[in-house]
Image (cartoon, grey):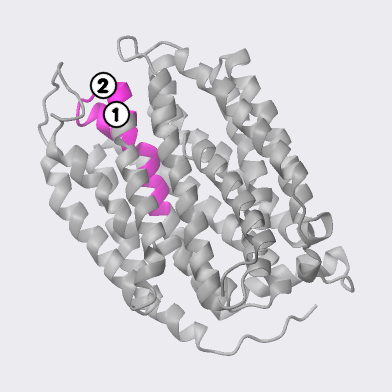
Amino acid sequence: MPLAPHQRLIALVLMLNYFLFGLLLNSVGIVILQSINSFGISKESAAVLEGFKDIPIAIVSFFVAALLPRLGYRRAMMIALAVVVAACLAMPLLREFWASKLFFLCVGAAFALVKVSVYASIGLLTRDKQDHASLMNTIEGIFMLGVLSGYWLFGAFIDAQNPASLGWLDTYWLLATICGINLLVMMAVRFDDRPARDDGARPLDDFIAMLRLAARPLVYTFVFSLFLYVLIEQGIGSWLPTFNNQVLKLPASISVQITSLFALSLALGRLGAGQLLKHIPWHWLLSGCVLAMATLMLLTLPLSHQVEADPRAHWFNLPLVAYLFPLIGLFMAPIYPVLNSVVLSALPRQQQSSMAGLIILFSALGGTTGSMITGMMFSRFSGQTAFYLALVPMAIILLLLFQLRRRTREPVPAPVV
C-alpha cells in the first residue's frame, strides 16, 4: 500500500537524517587513515575511534530506547542534530586527535537517538511486512548513499601531495552546515508517534520489558546474527581505506575515493533487495549473499599480494583488486536491513522501539569488535589476513539464518511487564 502524502514527507525527513548519519558515522575509516597520516599515531591507537563511535551508541540505545516514545521521536532527532552541529564545529577548531574521539562520541550518542526513532517510525508509517521491508531497505540504501558521499566529500579536502596536511578538517565546516539544515527541516515537520506509546506503563516497566524481549529465542538468535554481520561490515569498511593505502600502495586521496565503490555497492544492493524479495524468500536470498561474499573474498584477496606503488596512479589504472574487492558490498547489502525488518515486523508496535534499541546495541558492539580485531590483525600480520578472518563469522551467520527462519514462524507472545 503506497504511503499517503504526509507519510511520504515524514519518510523523506527520515531519509535525510539517515543520509547525514551515514556520511558522519562511516567517515571513521577516513579519519583512521588521516589520523595515522596527520597526527602520526599507530594503527592500534587509531582503531579506538570505532569504540568512541560505537560504545556511546550501545550505551544510549540500551538505556534510552525504551523511553524514547515518551520523549517523542521528532524531539529526539532534533536533540541529536543539535549535538552533531556542535561536534562538527569542534573538529576544525580544536585540530587534535582527541577531538576526533570527542566527535565520534557525540555522533555515536546522537545516532542512537536517530536510529531508534527512525526504526520505530517505519512501523508507524507502514501497514504490512512487505511495506515494512521495502521502506526499511530504501532508508538503509539512502544511508549508504550518505556513506558514498562521504568518501568523495572528504577526498576533495585531502591533500594528495602532503598526507600530513590538516586541510581535511575543513570538511567539517560543510558538514556542520548540512546538519543545521536538517535541524531546520525537522523543526518544520510534525508527525504523530502516539500509537507507539504505552501510556499505562512506567519508565522502569519499559526498560524491564526490553530486557525480557532480549531473552526470547527469536530475538537472541537475531541479535547474534546481527552482531556477526556488523563485525564483518565494519571491519572491512573501516579499514578498507588503509588497506588501499598501505597494501595496494595507492595515494591517500585515491584510497579514500576508491572505497566509495564499497559504499556504492552497499547502496545499490540495498535499494535493489526490495525487488528481489518479491520473488525470493528472504532466508534463501541472504544465504546466497553470504556464500557470494565468501567466494568473492577468496577470489580477489590473492590479487593484492606483491602490488607495487605506481606514482602515476589514477582511477583508471589501479590494481584489479581495488575495483573487485569493494563489490563484496553488493552481496553484503541486503543482510542488515532484511534481518532488521524480519524481526521488527514480527513484533507489536509497542515493542519496536525496545527492539530497535537492542538492534543498535548489538550493532555497536559488533562494529567496535570488528574494527578493533581487524586493526590488530592488520598491524600484527597483514591486511589480507585481517580480511580473511571475516570468513569465520560468515560461516556462523549461514548456520544462524535457518534457525532464525524457524523462529520467525513461531507465534510471538504478548508483551509482559
Quick one: label 1, few (<14), some, or many (20+) residues within 10 Å?
many
Based on the displayed image, in which of its 4 quarters is residue 199 positioned?
bottom right
Q: Does 219 sit above or below residue 318?
A: below
Image quarter of residue 383: top left
Q: Please state if 19 lies on the left or on the right of 303 as rendered.
A: right
Residue 292, image quadrant: bottom left
Helix, strand or loop at disc 1? helix
Q: Are marks 1 and 2 in contact (CB under 8 Å)?
A: yes
Q: Helix or strand or loop: what does disc 2 sit on?
A: loop
| Residue indicated by mark 1 | 255
Q: Residue at x 62, y 14 (%)?
A: 93
Q: Nearer the viewer, residue 277 or 401?
A: 277
Give the x, y percent position of residue 323: 20, 41
State the separation of the CA atoms marked 1 and 2: 6 Å
The three-letter code of the residue at mark 1 reads Ser
Specify whether 388 is left or right of 179.
left
Residue underneath mark 2:
251
Residue 392: give x, y in percent of width and height: 30, 60
Q: Is residue 42 visible?
A: no
229 relative to 324, above or below: below
Residue 364 place in picture, x, y as percent: 54, 51
Image quadrant containing the N terminus: bottom right
Residue 283 disc label? none
Q: In the rendered view of the protein, which quadrant contains the C terminus?
A: bottom right
Range covered by the magenta-colored residues? 231-256
Instruction: Please name whichever residue, 65 or 305, is drawn nearer the observer in this view of the structure.
Output: 65
Query: Which residue is pictured at 62% across the width and 45% down the height?
Result: 111
Q: Is residue 235 magenta?
A: yes
Q: Is residue 111 magenta?
A: no
